[in-house]
Image (cartoon, helix red, strand yellow):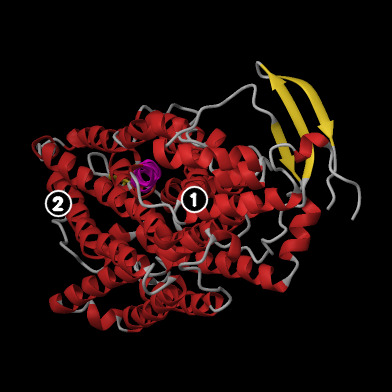
Amino acid sequence: MGESPTPWVTKGATSNYALDERRRAALAEVDSAPFSWFHVRVVCVAGAGFFADAYDIFGINIVATMIGYVYGARSAPGTPGKLSSNQDLGLKVATPVGTLVGQLLFGWLADIVGRKRLYGVELIIIMFCTFAQALSSGNHTVSIVGVLVVWRFLMGIGIGGDYPLSAIITSEFAPTRIRGRMMSTVFAFQGWGNFAAVFLSFIVTVAFKKRILADDIDTLNQVDYIWRIVIGLGCLPAVASLYFRLTIPETPRFTMDIERNVIQASDDIDAVLTRGSFNYDPDAVIQRADAPRASWDDFVSYFGKWENGKILLGTAWSWFSLDIAFYGLGLNSSIILQAIGFGTPPTKGTEAVYDNLHNATVGNLILSAAGLIPGYWAAFFLVDFWGRKPLQLMGFIVLTTLFIIMGFGYNTLTATTSGRNAFVFLYCLTNFFQNCGPNTTTFLIPGEIFPTRYRATGHGISAASGKFGAIIAQVGFSHMVDIGGTNKFIPHLMEMLAFFMLTGVFSTLLLPETKQISLEELSNEKQKGFVKGLTSRIEVQDGIVIRKHMETVYD
């Protein structure tokens, strides 16, 4: 036995053993809590952000075509314009680049300053940049496409911040038995956001039909109203959830393991689970526990162990390989539908413009309703029953098979009407198995598998790896799709996607199963004795520190 603890340590049962037991008891209370309205609030608030994210990301799929008609280069006076390949690439890749930056930045910051302090900041960025896009214009020095690229990059930073924050807040508040369903529900809002962007594009296009079909080709300027309305409406879901994000309480796990205020966190839990909030007492005594702290040396030590490092490698590569296909197709589905002759419009006049926009929106609605949305909800029902790892393995294996069929059988399938319908059906299946598989599980697993002090950072690194894959996919698609002629390289792109899906199978094998296991057990760190005592006690009055003790407690 070493020194005896000081009197203020023993008072209130804050000995080493008592603190450690109190931490584990508090965590057990969160893990076993009954499902409540607070959990519904967490899911809805986090999900609303993902709805806005998907709306803003995938809305550009059709909006880029609209912008091209109005501001793109025209082959002859009075004809519809078209964006150059670099302009189209800039509009579609700007957001993933910004998202990559935001995921790394906000993931790191969330493990330093807290989840609550940042939650809502990323939504404000999204709202401001989305509204700015709807009001954008160009001049003789900067084109409107250049302006939009800048705003979409900045918007992407906010979207990137939403990934680790929403995932971590949901996982740290969720009971163990339903954690997968809560997180998958949050992520499923992405499907509805994608659907909403396409559906509103369809509604506004139909509403402007008479103006677009006017004899004078200059009425194509009416398309300028359409894309601005579609983009601008992306602000609404963000506005609706902003207040709730700004007022959501800090997670007890952050307070306990990163702020190391075990007593405060354990006192907060009952209030959070029953009222969804807790009262801040400016005069409360702050007692810092002696527990593992985040640092570069600790990061290297933790992930330098193969048992931990392989998990980060597995989550990062799985997300990378998945997003190559998910964004490579998701941001270019209109191009693929046109390439296979889905609803080919007339070839001249404003009627061609309207029919092209109409068919593109209808085709994307079919892809979304028949594949994307059902896939998300199939994952919801299976993720806590079958498990994350089997679901991800199944998804990658099926996707590998589908892309092989679509790639090597492309010319045969697209040669006839029935074959084109079969291709669209297979395309819907890829959307289904992406979402009922790796697109959902690559979001879930990084939000569960790392210790609290690196949970947001690990999720941010994994998600950023995915966006790096999305950038590669978009750049590759843009520069390779026309090799050998317009849209001639599409079958070979499908074959390449099959290869990346196959690599996802092997990266998934590096991951453990996470269903029905507590976050602390998944961290690969011994929990008994995790807290070794107190390192400091801070007494405050009216929010001002009046006394600070520095102590180390030994058994």
Which residue is farthest right? 2
Residue 451 is labelled as none
Which of the two residues, 491 or 115, is positioned nearer the viewer here?
115
What amino acid is labelled 2 in the image? Asp
Residue occupying the point 69% across, 49% down: 18
Q: Nearer the viewer, residue 15 or 102?
A: 15
Residue drawn at x 62%, y 63% is: 523
Up-down relation of residue 404 to residue 483 (above or below)? below
Q: Which mark is residue 96?
A: 1
Q: Are marks 1 and 2 in contact (CB under 8 Å)?
A: no
Q: Residue at x 15, y 46 (%)?
A: 354
**Which of the two labelled residues, at mark 1 and mark 2, occupies the earlier sequence position?**
1
User: What is the magenta range?
Assistant: 38-56
Secondary structure of residue under mark 1: helix
Q: Position of residue 150 (x, y in %)?
A: 50, 37
- How would you rate the neighbour count of disc 2 (Cα within 10 Å): few for under 14, some for 14-19, many for 20 or more? some
